[in-house]
Amino acid sequence: MLKRKQHSSRTSGTNGRSGSIRIISGRWRGRKLPVHDAEGLRPTTDRVKETVFNWLAPDIPRARCLDLFSGSGGLGFEAASRGAEKVVMLELNKQAHSQLKQNAESLKADNIELHHIDALTFLDKIATPFDVIFIDPPFRKDLLEATLTKLENNGWLAANAMIYIEAEKELSSLPVPAHWHLHRDKTAGQVTFKLYEREE
């Protein structure tokens, strides 16, 4: 994680070296995109990403998606490639945001909107509801509870929104609202990932 007071994104690798992510399916299938490799950045692995998008296969086309801690952009770009109507991606780290912007431009992506902003600050704005939300914050920064509360209380979620959460494995119980139904969950290495469906 980026060692500063602001809420940074998920990012892996170290010492400024650059890596890449691969888009698995959709209109940009097979495209590799460079990643700004900030300290603490941990892109979602291909294995986890493939599982998650298999779970979400019927929900992504024509959906409005919100990627709160974009980091490498692996989840947001994958959703956009698979036919999401719009993907809003938030990233606080300046260099990582700049790389996301370059990648979106190289894809000529007309369904991606990028914001260089802290996720919790963004969630205090006037909301428009989203159908699918990706939440993969920096580990061990205690950002999940505030993020989930703002999403639910500030009107960011469509009636039957799908909410994906990626967190450290030791967080076996997540502070989700009572009317979020656990749809699927799995653990891979040190990461637990869960998909919830919001019920009105």
Image: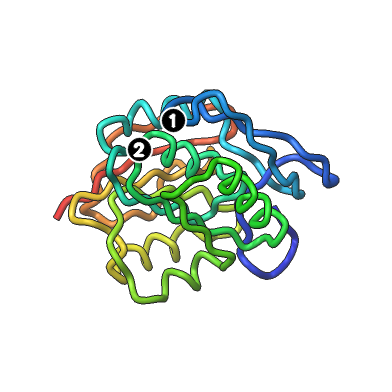
Helix, strand or loop under label 2: loop
Q: Which residue is found at the position 64% from the left and 36% from the top?
A: 33
| Marks 2 and 1 in Cβ contact (< 8 Å) | yes
* Residue shown at the point (42%, 39%) measured from the top left: 79
Query: Compared to 29, does 193 lie above or below?
Result: below
The numbered dot on residue 83 is 2
Q: Quadrant of the C terminus?
A: bottom left
Amino acid type shown at disc 2? Gly
Is 169 placed left or right of 111 in the picture?
Answer: right
Looking at the image, residue 165 lies above or below residue 126: above
- Extreme residue toward the left, this view: 200
Q: Please provide percent x and percent y for residue 159.
A: 18, 55
Is residue 139 in view? no
Q: Where on the picture, by quarter, is residue 165?
A: top left
Query: Left or right: where does residue 62 sit relative to residue 81?
Result: left
146 to the left or right of 17? left
Q: Position of residue 147 (x, y in %)?
A: 44, 62
Q: Residue furthest front?
A: 108
Quarter of the rendering containing residue 116: bottom right
Disc 1, SS: loop
Res. 96 mark: none
Q: Residue at position x 49%, y 36% from top? A: 192
Residue 27 image position (x, y, % from top left): 44, 30
Mark 1 Cα-neighbour bin, 10 Å: few <14, some 14–19, many ≥20:
some
- Report if residue 41 is visible in the image: yes
Residue receiving disc 1: 27
Q: Residue at x 47, y 57 (%)?
A: 113
Which amino acid is tagged 1? Arg
Question: Of the residues under marks 2 and 1, which one precedes in the sequence?
Answer: 1
Give how far across and how far down residue 32 sits, in percent. 63, 30
Farthest residue to the right: give it.
15
